Image (cartoon, helix red, strand yellow):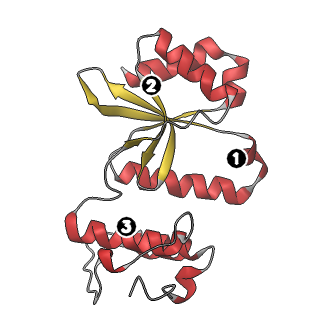
Amino acid sequence: EGGKGPQNFGPINQDTGWRRLNVLFTRAKERMEVFSSMRSTDIVPKEGGDRGPRSLQLFLEYAETGRLGGERKVSGRPTGSEFEDAVIEGLEELGFDCVPQLGVANFFLDIAVRDPDSPGDFVAAGECDGAAYHSERAARDRDRVRQEILENLGWNILRVWSTDWFRNPDGELRRVSDELR
């Protein structure tokens, strides 16, 4: 019914509908069985919106294929801050190949670090905090949910905190480098 107007999934269509789905999807401890009268291809989210329906579509795709979020995409987007630029510059000086704003499962990773033995693959994602992270509880909650989703996809997430970086950039760079190695 994608071409016949907006699809209505009730509360899932609301701005926080994706949170309801996240709670539902993350509660199974051992096993989950999915019975659905629709497939992921039946859901047509609006461009740039519909986070709830998009989350439902991704979950159904995962249930169908065992894959979530499709391929990783180099977005070509610039970094989100001078702080991220500094972290990338420091890592690249140590020989790491970094990609800013890599698209994964409907998210953009601040910094993706390529696997030196297999350049098409990545060993980790560096996530940097920003002003929004510190100023808004909802942003911190969203970041935790996002990290959980990415870790479930097999990503190693390395947090780089701006306060630690500005106090001791060499020490933080050494810590991140040691974790990457």
Please tell me whether residue 142 is drawn above or below residue 33 in the rendered image. Answer: above
Name above or below for residue 55 compared with residue 104.
Answer: below
Q: Is residue 124 above or below residue 167?
A: below
> Which residue is found at the position 54% from the left and 72% from the top?
50
User: Dot 2: within a 10 Å radius of its alpha carbon, few (fewer than 14), some, or many (20 or more) residues?
Assistant: many
- Residues tagged 1 and 2 counted as in contact (Cβ below 8 A): no
Residues at discs 3 and 2 in contact (Cβ within 8 Å): no
Q: Which mark is residue 58?
A: 3
Mark 1 or 2, closer to the camera: 2
Residue topped by disc 1: 133
**Which of the 4 image quarters holds residue 17?**
bottom right
- In which quarter of the view is residue 57 placed? bottom left
At a point 55% along the width and 14% down the height, the residue shown is 90
Q: Quadrant of the N terminus?
A: bottom left
Work out which residue is located at the far front of the displayed protein and give it: 3
Would residue 30 be seen by someone viewing this image from the given angle? no
Residue to which mark 2 is pinned = 98
Q: Position of residue 162 (x, y in %)?
A: 69, 30
In the image, 80 versus 78, the foreground residue is: 78
Disc 1 secondary structure class: helix
Taking the image as drawn, is residue 108 in sight?
Answer: yes
